[in-house]
Image: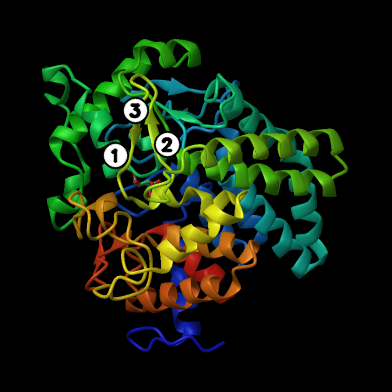
Amino acid sequence: MTVATHTGVAPPALAASAAYILRGNDIGTLTTAAPRLYPHLWSWDAAFVAIGLATVSVPRAIAELRTLLGAQWTTGMLPHIVFGPDEGYFPGPDVWGATTPSGARTSGICQPPVHAIAVRRVLDAGRRNGGADRDLAERFAAETFDRWLAWHRWLATARDPRGRGLLEIYHGWESGMDNSPRWDAAYAAVRPREDLLRGRARRDLEHVADARQRPTDEEYRRYLWLVHQMKEAGYDDDAVRETVDFRMTDVFMSAIAALASDVLAEIGDELGRRAEATELRALAERFRGGVLSTVSPDTGLARDEDVRTGLRLDAPTIGGFAPLLCGGDPRVFSRQLALFTGPEWCGHPDLRYALPPSTAPGHAGFSSRTYWRGPQWPFMNWLLYWTLHRAGEVDLAMSLRAEGLRQLGDLAFGEYYEPMTGEALGSAHQSWTAAVALDWLI
Ligand code: 9YW
């Protein structure tokens, strides 16, 4: 396999470094999302980590997913953080105050449901390897199918109470795109109690070279206020929905739910779970319909909605490309492909690598070094690569892979990258970055 990286690193050296990073971040039952900045398991990170681990150890990939499942709430929700023993992250378990009956210390919110893709990849890797790996992977899929199904059912009821095919989120963290311009208007209306951060130190700024790469204190105050409100509501789904100051539909998460429901339905077929596969396909259809209903005829991008005001939001972010993940309308899809590869996005002349920035460079909210307001995220490149490949857009998928690998040739395994210079930003040795490199190479 010959993919030249920008520093000329040979693929075997890149793959070996990626495996080394994942090994270094492994604390036994979980792989920390990053060594210092994120010393715990994050839900959607764990799925990508399992995808990477499956290329080197099917049993270890399964262990990662089992740790996440071990923290599943009785409602079916998979929490966005499963805390390990480290005390170095804020807000930690004491702030969330959520322990499952099984004794897992977790956060009280969720993240996008990409997990069925990880189960698929683990199953495929096990079958490719054969022998004990095949048995283990097949047993794992059969044993845990109902748990993933419960997760999808919870999303479909608790987070889409009116059956619109659009998942609601109650915190920007749930989108996985914390400070994206997608959420600016909604956060502007959140009025936190002034004393909230007093005596409670953020720890994230200790681990990045430049505070401008992270959300601001003002943003953090709002994040914490929402946590406070949800905790006050006892994390009861109905109570949270009615009381929290942030209530948005998330098109990108809804598109992931459509995609993952289809993937889980395929696994259900293989396991002979016909009724459940039919139910999941209906869910996929519902979410696909929901996402497509939000597409702006003017911009061609899908839009989030503030449920409390009914306003649709037009921020040109990566979230707007939700239809690329879920498909469903060939005209919308081809318009999105043209936009995605065109000069406002991956084809922007100033980009170091032809990969999607998290916010369109021409937009007022764009900031090339700040988290979800501009930088490129390697796991996102992988998700789009995998989905587009599955949808038959092989050339574009392979170009995302090639560019994505060139970007990772600095061996920094950055959390995110400055799109114009290619500089690695945020945390170094980020697990899901290493994981996608492994999947691309092995
Ligand atoms: C935080 C772990 C997580 C990701 C999110 C990303 C960031 C956590 O890191 O949020 O503390 O702000 O936005 O998508 O899961 O990698």
Q: Position of residue 237 (x, y in %)?
A: 49, 16
> Could you say whether the residue bearing mark 2 is in a helix, strand or loop?
loop
Q: Are marks 1 and 2 in contact (CB under 8 Å)?
A: yes
- Mark 2 lies within 8 Å of ligand 1 (Cβ measured): no
Q: Quadrant of ligand 1?
A: top left
As drawn, 412 above or below 235: below
Q: Which residue appears at 20% of the width and 59% of the height?
A: 369
- Mark 1 residue type: Tyr
Residue 50: which disc? none
Image height check: is 197 above or below 348? Answer: above
Q: At which x and y percent is residue 291?
A: 52, 40
The location of residue 375, given as percent across then percent down, is 28, 59
Q: Residues within 10 Å of mark 3 (few under 14, many from 20)?
A: few
Asked which quadrant contains residue 230, the reply is top left
Work out whether residue 263 or residue 17 is closer to the camera in this orientation and state it: 263
**Helix, strand or loop under label 3:** loop
The residue beneath circle 2 is 83
Q: Which residue is mark 1?
A: 89
Sequence-wise first label, 1 or 2: 2
Could you tell me if residue 57 is visible in this image? no
